Image (cartoon, helix red, strand yellow):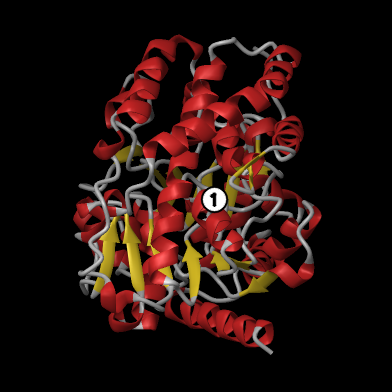
Amino acid sequence: MKRITSEELSRFEVELNQFTFRDIRVGSLIGSHLNLDFLYGHYNPKDYLKEIATSFYIKYLPSKHIKGFNVKKHQNSKGLPILTFLSDRRHLFNMSYPVFEALDPENVFCLIKNEKVLRQFKTKPVHFAFFDELPTYDYKTWHKEFKQLWKEIAETTNHFIARHKIHKNYKYRLKNNLLGETRFILAFENMLDFLKPQYVLTEADRHTYTSSLISTANKNHIQTFSMVHGVPGNTIGFTPLIANKVLVWGERQKQSFIKFGATDDKICVTGATQLVKEIIGNKEQIKERLGLPNKIRVIVLATNPTKVEHRIMLYQLFCDAFRYLPKDQYYGLVKLHPSEEKSFYENFDKPSNVLIGDANVISFENTFALADMVCNYNSAFAIDTILRGLPLITINVDDKHLGQAKDYIEFGNLPQAKSGSELVDIITGYFSKSNAIELMKKVNAYAKAYCDDTGKSAAENMLKCIKNDIHQKNN
C-alpha cells in the first residue's frame, strides 16, 4: 500500500460528505479515523478477523456499550453546559479539567469516559455520566438506517480503496468506525433532547465520538465549541471545523487553521489550558541526587513512540554526538515517553555519559529544571521546552514526519541537526555563547506566537469567548 497524503484523505472525506446519516455529514464522522488509520498507521489489513468480530459485537450486543440514562438522577442537570472527558489519555484530561474548575462543579455536566478518568478529578463533579450511561436507542431503527447508508457509500468507498491500492479488508475497518459513530448519534440525540444544554465544549473537534456529539448538537441548534488537540500540520483531523467555534492556543495556531480552510470568525485565541510555562524543581538538588557534578551541562533527549526506525536513528545520532562531547562538560539524559520501554534502547551501545531515564529516575517537571538544552525529533515535549524558555534542537531523522517541528524549524527558525557532528556543532556553539543570545530570541519569539496563555488563565479566556459568542448569537 502506497503512502496516502493528508490531501488525498481529505478528498475522501469530502466525497463521503455528500452522504448523510440523520442529516449529519458522513465524512465529518470519519476524519479522525482516517488520520489515525493512515497517517499514524493504525490500520493493519491482517486484523480483518478482529474487525469482523468487532462488527458483530457492535451490531448485536449494543447494551454492552450503552446501558441507559438515569433520568431521575440527571433531572437537575438540565440546561447546564456539557464538558467532555472522552479520553483516558492524561494530556487530554488536562485540557478539560481547568475549564471544569473555572466553571464550578455545580454549573457543568461532565460526560466522562470511565471510572479511571473520574479518579483523576481532584474535585468530584456534581453532574456527570459515564460514556456507557448514555440513553439507549432504537436498535432496529439504527440498524436499518445504517444498512441503507452502507449501500449508499459502497461505490465511493470502493473507488477510494482502488485508487490507493488499499487492501479490500479496509472496508471492515471503515464499517466498524461508522458503526460506532452512527449509533452514538442516536444516543446523543436522546441525551441532548433531555438535557437541553446551554452549549457543548469538547477537548477536540474531530476525534472519536466528539465529532458525532458536536454534529448532533449542531443539528439540534445547540452551540458547540472545541479545544484543540495538537497543531494543524495538515487538513485531515483538523479541518473543516465541525464545531461552531474552535478555541486555539495562539496566533500561530490560528493562522494554521486559516491556511487549511477555517474562517477567522470560527476561531478564538484563548491559550492552552494543559500547558505551563513555569519550571518546577531545583537544578542543583536534582544533580546531587543523580550524582552529577554541579557544573556539568545536561542535554535531554525527549523520545516518543514514532516509527521504530526513527526511534533507533534518533537515539543513535544523540549517542554519536556524546562520543565527541567532553565527558567532564556534557551529560546526556534520554527522557522516555511514558508509553516506551527502557529495554528498547538498552539493546544499543551508548557512551558512558548518557543515561536512559524514566519516571522513576526523574519526573516530567524536574526534567525541565535539570535540562540546559533539549533535543527531540517530533515529540510534544518540544513545545513544553519552548514555553519554558529552554534552547531546543530538532534531530531530524526524516523530513516527512516532522509534525510540529516543521513549523518551529521553518517559521521559528530553530536549529536542526541531521547527523551527530551537526548536533555537536550546535551544542558547542550555543554553550560557547556565540549563538546563545540569538537562539533564545528565536525560542522566546516562537513561544509568544505559539501560546497566548496557559492553565487557569487560558480556561477563563475560553469561558469569556464562549459567553461572548452566545451573547452575540442571541442578540
Q: Position of residue 359 (x, y in %)?
A: 25, 48
Q: Is residue 70 left or right of residue 454?
A: left
Q: Position of residue 80 (x, y in %)?
A: 39, 78
Q: Residue at x 36, y 40 (%)?
A: 336
Image-quadrant location for residue 402 = top right
The amino acid sitting under disc 1 is Ser
Residues 370 and 237: in front is 237
Q: Give 181 or 266, whichever is nearer the viewer.
A: 181
Element on which disc 1 rests:
helix
Q: Say which of 66 and 387 sits in front.
A: 66
Question: Is residue 110 something one can see in this rendering?
Answer: yes
The answer to whether residue 348 is above or below residue 356 is above
Residue 138 x %, y %:
38, 43
Task: Return the x and y of residue 455 as percentages of the image width and height.
Answer: 44, 74
Q: Looking at the picture, does residue 259 appear above or below residue 326?
A: below
39 above or below 72?
above
Q: Is residue 362 above or below residue 422?
A: below
Q: Which residue is mark 1?
A: 211
Looking at the image, which residue is at 58% across and 38% down? 30
Q: Is disc 1 surrounded by few (<14), some (14 to 19) or many (20+) residues within 10 Å?
A: many
Which is nearer the eye, 13 or 422?
13
Drawn side of residue 395 relative to residue 144, left or right: right
State which quarter of the image contains the N terminus: top right
- The answer to whether residue 304 shows anywhere in this view is no
Give me the residue at 56% from left, 18% from top.
171
